[in-house]
Amino acid sequence: MAREIPVDREEELEIFKTMLSGKNEERILLIEAQSGMGKTILLGEFDHSKPKRIAFAKIDFKGGGTSIAELFYRLRDKLGREIKFPNLDKELKGILNPTIDIKSNMMLGKNQIDAYLSSRDDQEREMRLSALTDALFKDLRNLGKVLIIFDTFEKSDGSIKKWLADSFLSRVQNSPNTFVVIGGQEVPEDNLEWDCIRRPLKGIPHNHWQKYAESQGIIIHIEYVRACCDIYSGHPLKIKNYLDGYSLRGGKA
Amino acid sequence: MSTERDFLRKLEKAKTEDEKTWLTTKRLIDSLSEDMRTLVYSAAIPHWFDAKTLRALHPELSRKIRWLYPKLQKLSFVEPFEGRGHNIHELTRRLILDYLWKKQRRSYRSKSQVLANFYHDSARLAQKKIARKIKELGSRKDKKKFRREIQQWAKKNPEIVNAASSDFQIEYVYHLVIAQPKEGANYFQKMGWRWHDKFDYSFAELNGLIDSVGEHIVANRVKGRIVGWEKYFRGLLYFYRIENVNAAACFSDVIRTSFPDRRLNADVRYRLGNVHKRLSELPKALACYEEALPLYRAINNKLGEANCIRSIGDVHLRLSELPEARARYEEALLIYRTINSKLGEANCISSLGDVHLRLSELPEARARYEEALPIYRAINNKLSEAKCISSLGDVHLRLNEFDQAINAYKKAVELDPENFRRWYTLGEVYRDEDIWQDAIEAFNNAISLNKQPAYIWVKLGNVYRDHNLIEKAINAYETASNLDSKISEPHFELGHLYLRSQKYEEALDNFQKAIDLEPNEPYYRNHFGYTQFKLNKFEEALLAFDKAIEINPENGEFHYSRIRALRALDRNDEANKEIEITKSLIQKNDYYNQACFELICGNIDAALLLLGEAIKKRPRTKIWARHDPDFESIRNDPRFKELVGK
């Protein structure tokens, strides 16, 4: 359904495509905008316009409650299961003699990662996370081109935010075939260890909404569209609600 | 059309952005059919929904859901929710919930009750199904096959796996706190503690729970003690992430608000005390614990009371107020015994052992640790058992019972092999005993578990250096310096290594770097001076020795160095005066420095006798002596060679 909503985000799509083509030095794209500005839809467009032969994973933190272990599990699961992650598996097996509690968690792989990362010592946990991240990136580098999209970054928990902003992105910087897009009402702050393209989303101008209304068979005076657009500063969700409401009340061809 | 103009004018006049947004959203919802409108309002209550959720909320629409749900998905504010179905967009959902809370609170509460029941029952049913499946497959002997089969089953039944996840339990609490605020608050607290005590250290579930209930708090839909508990748990998460300032802010906020919950008011003071203790703000920590203590007593919470008293003891121990620490540990011990808290009892006894150790009451310390050990064993707490055995090792070491010390540290490593600190301690004692190959292995094991602490690399470098594995030593020191550029030890040890190798310029360079990082360390000045001395720069050497003495006038070694420089400069009267000062400063039982002193006074026999005593006391001393410039004048003496070995 998301693709039916208008997205006048040609510039952002172009930036994304140029980044994936390898013409830019930066391989990290940060899309920041307030709620309802169409981030998720834009990230969906990125998904649809990506090349076919690219390993791809999209992680949405919308539900909250995602642990780092779960994040590793989901990345591994989406990018191609364990067969493609020999280094990650070796790292996990190297230190573990896991006593897996299946009853408490059906995500067996996640449970293994959980056990690996669960040390009572802060420093040791940090070290293991760092070793696991290294192993993940060793495997990612062997996968060819990889695109990872993270959505709703602001809902991820503090430890994930820190890990993504520090360890993860600094390794992306050194992985020439790995591309990352992060979207959210908040995104990682600038860091000396990695370069990025930072793209805040702006409102969409009224002429685009006029076209959208026409494409949906909504007959509406341009003056109303312009007024609504001014009132909401081009905010996509609010304008879409207005136009849909107008349409349902009879303003339809 | 004038109606449309009126509406736009109304929008323009709206005072807030939310008001503006709601006007449009409400108009859109009002334009929907009655069934759709009903569904939109209800679908906004949970974080996600699917046809099942909608049927639970509106059994009267059960048949229509099949075609209403797809229609719902086409609305602009409805978006897919991976693995769950759909959700109302966050912005719209927030406004709908505000509206429901203000205008249809009773209906909101009753829908929340329906959802609470729905998530509770779904989770329970899913857990039962999983348990049944595990039982069914559990008889398989082949564990790998079992794992594969259960994994395949889980893949085929994502709905069951989803419903058994913590997300459903979080959603249950989220709705219960609206439907039944009192019971919801109790359950929130209970689940918070359950997930807190899970020891998975990511605290993802607890984080999810407090974020979820936090939504209601921000929207003012829940009040009272649940707000305090939410902030309390948030503070705990900050504490575990070592975000001490945020943790202290949360706890202080709870204390300021003074929620009507006596357990919370006691706990929060105790936890704030822990933050201060970690920050070494010991008087503040003490004040917090002392505030918490009567609160625990007032609610007759014995465990809280005992924990609090023990923490007060910890603060006293850190402040070296040992009689006070002992009194507190003994007081806490009685309570732990009364409530039969074995862990608390063993911890207290072990802490009493620490007090004795600090007071050099070694037999008493040993007795305490030996008393705590069987309790740890009885409750199968291997980690605390390892720590206790390691402390016993410390006692043996202090009693010069080296074999027993090594055995104790080895046992501690066996019990807690993934703790780098245990390996490090074992490496230290091996190094002390000059069992250097085992020391290298132990330090390497510590490093394989935790590469970060630079001090382990320094110690490893020292073993290599002591045994002339120069390249490896340099590599270890450089790794330490790269890991932590702010520490001075790697430069000092490198300087020392170059000094030994007679590469004086490199030595000077490294000693200078160590001094730059730690200008008030007199030993660095002393070694810097000695290197200058070797370069025949006696004036510069004297300046450095003077600086070392200025920093620490009570150390005989620095005066001893000064004697050497004064003699080289032919300032013999001053040197003789310095000898008198040095004599008064070297302690009677410091055989090593006494030997150095006797040597500079020309008493070779006495020097060798004292050096022998020093080596008996601490075998590793001979390694130091082999390279110590103070013994240069007797390095070729066969008696010296016999004492220190090759």
Image (tube, grey):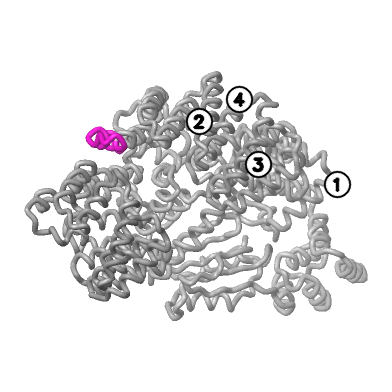
Q: Which residue is mark 3?
A: B53
Identify the mark at residue B103; answer none if there is no mark.
1
In the image, is B255 to the left or to the right of B597?
right
**Separation of disc 1 and disc 3 at Cα?**
23 Å
The region drawn magenta spans: B397-414
Whichever of callouts 4 and 1 sits on the residue coming sooner in the sequence is 1
Q: Amino acid at mark 4?
A: Lys
- Nearer-N-terminus badge (1/3): 3
Q: Chain of mark 2?
A: B
The numbered mark at residue B326 is: 2
At which x and y percent is residue A188? 55, 65
Query: What is the spatial separation of the Cα atoms under label 4 and label 2, in whole angstroms?
Result: 19 Å
Q: Does residue A168 lie above or below B182 as drawn?
A: below
Q: Chain of mark 3?
A: B
**Dot 1: few (<14), some (14–19), or many (≥20) neighbours within 10 Å?**
few
In the picture, the disc for residue B305 is none
Q: Nearer the viewer, residue A85 or A97?
A: A97
Q: According to the image, label 4 marks what residue?
A: B302
Q: Is residue B18 above or below residue A211?
A: above
Q: How far, Cα to Cα, is label 2 from label 1? A: 61 Å
